[in-house]
């Protein structure tokens, strides 16, 4: 089991690149961090709609796979409190990624110069 292709919004892509550069990690790891952050700050399903923009970025298949996918799948199902089929799961996964990216971006903007961003994420 693994994630399917998902289209990240243009703003989400810009934030993803900034987060990956700041943390000095690759994009797949930044996507996983954003997903975890999105799930952790949510209180139910994500209701916000994130506009696609003109320059969307496709999150490739299999970035999140095997045991990681299973863990995130169950965390999402628990968070939205619904049984989800594959398309709905990917839709919610993308929404949590987008929400997590925006929260990480806010955390990055609001940190002081002395703070380590890695600690801020926690």
Image (cartoon, helix red, strand yellow):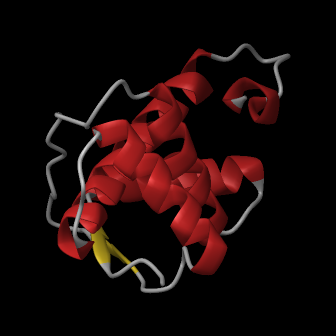
Vertical side of 119 occupied by 60: above or below: below
**What x and y, as percent, mark residue 70?**
54, 68
The image shows residue 107 at horizontal and vertical percentages of: 57, 24
Count of labels in the image: 0
Estimate the x, y position of residue 69 in percent, counting from the top left.
53, 70
Q: Is residue 101 left or right of residue 33?
A: left
Residue 50 image position (x, y, % from top left): 19, 45
Please state, as top left, top right, bottom left or bottom right, where the C terminus lies in the image. top right
Q: Quadrant of residue 5?
A: bottom left
Residue drawn at point x = 31 percent, y = 50 percent: 11
Q: Is residue 50 left or right of residue 66?
A: left
Q: Taking the image as drawn, is residue 110 in sight?
A: yes
- Asked whether the viewer can see residue 15, the reply is no
Residue appearing at x 24%, y 56% in the figure: 83
Query: For this rendering, which residue is in front, 97 or 83?
Result: 83
Relative to 66, say whether 17 is above or below: above
Which is more toward the observer, 66 or 10?
66
What residue is drawn where x is 74% and y is 49%? 23
Which picture quadrant has residue 64?
A: bottom right
Q: Is residue 19 above or below residue 63?
A: above
Identify which residue, 33 or 27, lies in the foreground: 33
């Amino acid at each position: 089991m693994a994630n399917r292709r998902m289209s990240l919004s243009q703003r989400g892509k810009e934030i993803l690149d900034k987060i990956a550069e700041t943390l000095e990690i690759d994009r797949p790891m930044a996507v996983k961090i954003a997903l975890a952050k999105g799930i952790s700050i949510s209180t139910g399903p994500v209701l916000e709609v994130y506009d696609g923009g003109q320059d969307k970025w496709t999150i490739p298949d299999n970035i999140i796979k095997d045991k990681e996918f299973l863990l995130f799948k169950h965390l999402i199902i628990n968070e939205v409190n619904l049984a989800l089929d594959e398309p709905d799961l990917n839709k919610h996964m993308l929404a949590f990624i987008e929400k997590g990216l925006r929260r990480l971006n806010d955390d990055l903007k609001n940190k002081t110069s002395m703070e380590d961003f890695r600690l801020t994420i926690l």
